[in-house]
Image: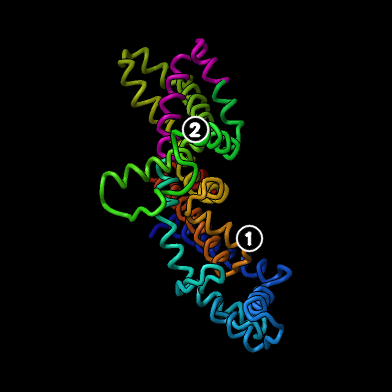
């Protein structure tokens, strides 16, 4: 194992440990913690205030796998031990194990974000390359202005406009959900078409508002590479233009975009919280916001941990694979994703 790989894995492990610790401290410090919530739930269900502390502690331990009557450092050790074993506790709001909820929700979020990211970067890279090739033309000026405008629009604003126009006014797409109400998941073409139809507006919101930024970045990278001396030398030596565009300009302009792609995938998990809430798309982000509103601490901590883990994993993949694409990274150890 190389020193570079060991360093990146150590940093990722420490980041995950720090996030788990900070999450535990923050949630325990919030006024009206899990004990108060459970006590309120019991009082509401029984209609009286005769709830003993032992009952509250028993339910809190069953839900969060920690005993609230224990000292804080004992609760922290139990919490970390359970997290490392994959035991995330039981949701107070949905009355189901947190890991089962996350396993059920994660594929929908991955489906949504992977397609949106792939379309955003594919279209943005192609558009940015054309803009750089036609630098200074009307097409370049026009698309630059449009790209800057689209990049300045928050995705959730575009999502609300898309729902108002494309869902309610024109009725082209459904406004919520990830499949028709009452439909059972099945490996059939009709079910897959329904899923894509329901995911169109969320995906469109991310692609339209993210496309401009990718195109502008690719345009800047390509123009910078075109101005390098080795490109002029290649032209003077009579290297065909297509070979210069694909082998020299395209490849070197795409290197910085690769890191941005992997980081964007990770950070989109955080953005999925608002997007999935707008479209009532029951992914990991929708469940996280539901947990916050219901003060469902086990589900809140589990969802937040999974989102953080996704960000760390994708950034780690970007770091480790980028060194294979550009060997200078491993030699110089100076161009890291984070």
The residue drawn where x is 52% and y is 19% is: 143
The residue drawn where x is 46% and y is 39% is: 203
Is 139 located above or below residue 39 in the figure? above
Is 253 located above or below residue 300 in the figure? above
Instruction: Point out residue 72 in the picture as x, y percentages from the top left corner.
Output: 67, 80
Query: Magenta stretch?
Result: 116-145
Residue 148 belongs to the span the image colors magenta: no
Residue 120 belongs to the span the image colors magenta: yes
Q: How far apart are labels 2 and 1 at the CA level?
A: 29 Å
* Most common secondary structure along the magenta stretch: helix
Q: Residue furthest left?
A: 188
Instruction: Point out residue 331 in the picture as x, y percentages from the top left corner.
Output: 44, 46
The residue drawn where x is 47% and y is 38% is: 201
Q: Nearer the viewer, residue 23 or 69?
A: 69
Tell me the residue that label 2 is attached to. Answer: 166
Dot 2, crowdedness within 10 Å: few (<14), some or many (≥20)? Answer: some
> The residue tagged with tag 1: helix, strand or loop?
helix
Residue 307 visible in the shown view: yes
Q: Residue furthest right?
A: 31
Tell me which numbered mark, 2 or 1, is placed earlier along the sequence. Answer: 2
Can you tell which mark lies on residue 75? none
Residue 293 falls in image quadrant: bottom right
Please state, as top left, top right, bottom left or bottom right, where the N terminus lies in the image. bottom left
> The residue tagged with tag 2: helix, strand or loop?
helix
Q: Nearer the viewer, residue 3 or 218?
A: 218
The reply, left or right, for residue 167 in relation to residue 44 is left
Tell me the residue that label 1 is attached to. Answer: 293
Dot 1, crowdedness within 10 Å: few (<14), some or many (≥20)? Answer: few
Instruction: Point out residue 326 in the picture as x, y percentages from the top left corner.
Output: 40, 40
Q: Nearer the viewer, residue 270 or 279?
A: 279
């Amino acid at each position: 194992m190389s020193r570079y790989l060991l360093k990146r894995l150590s940093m990722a492990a420490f980041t995950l440990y720090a996030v788990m610790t900070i999450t535990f401290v923050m949630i325990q410090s919030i006024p009206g913690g899990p004990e108060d919530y459970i006590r309120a739930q019991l009082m509401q269900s029984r209609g009286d205030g005769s709830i003993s502390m032992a009952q509250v502690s028993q339910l809190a331990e069953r839900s969060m796998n920690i005993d609230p009557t224990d000292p804080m450092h004992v609760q922290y050790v139990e919490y970390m031990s359970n997290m490392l074993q994959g035991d995330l506790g039981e949701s107070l709001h949905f009355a189901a194990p947190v890991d089962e909820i996350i396993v059920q929700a994660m594929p929908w979020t991955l489906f949504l974000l992977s397609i949106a990211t792939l379309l955003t970067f594919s279209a943005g890279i192609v558009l940015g390359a054309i803009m750089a090739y036609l630098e200074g033309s009307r097409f370049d000026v026009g698309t630059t202005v449009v790209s800057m405008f689209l990049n300045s629009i928050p995705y959730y604003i575009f999502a609300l406009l898309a729902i108002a126009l494309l869902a309610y006014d024109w009725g082209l797409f459904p406004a919520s959900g990830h499949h028709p109400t009452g439909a059972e998941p099945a490996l059939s073409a009709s079910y897959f078409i329904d899923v894509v139809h329901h995911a169109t507006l969320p995906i469109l919101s991310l692609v339209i508002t993210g496309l401009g930024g990718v195109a502008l970045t690719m345009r800047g990278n390509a123009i910078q590479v075109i101005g390098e001396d080795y490109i002029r030398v290649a032209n003077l030596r009579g290297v065909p233009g297509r070979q210069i565009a694909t082998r020299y300009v395209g490849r070197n302009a795409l290197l910085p975009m690769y890191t941005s792609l992997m980081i964007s995938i990770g950070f989109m998990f955080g953005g999925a919280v608002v997007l999935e809430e707008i479209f009532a798309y029951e992914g990991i982000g929708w469940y996280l916001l539901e947990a916050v509103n219901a003060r469902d601490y086990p589900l809140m901590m589990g969802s937040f941990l999974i989102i953080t883990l996704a960000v760390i994993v994708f950034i780690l993949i970007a770091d480790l694979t980028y060194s294979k694409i550009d060997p200078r990274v491993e030699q110089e150890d100076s161009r890291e994703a984070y």
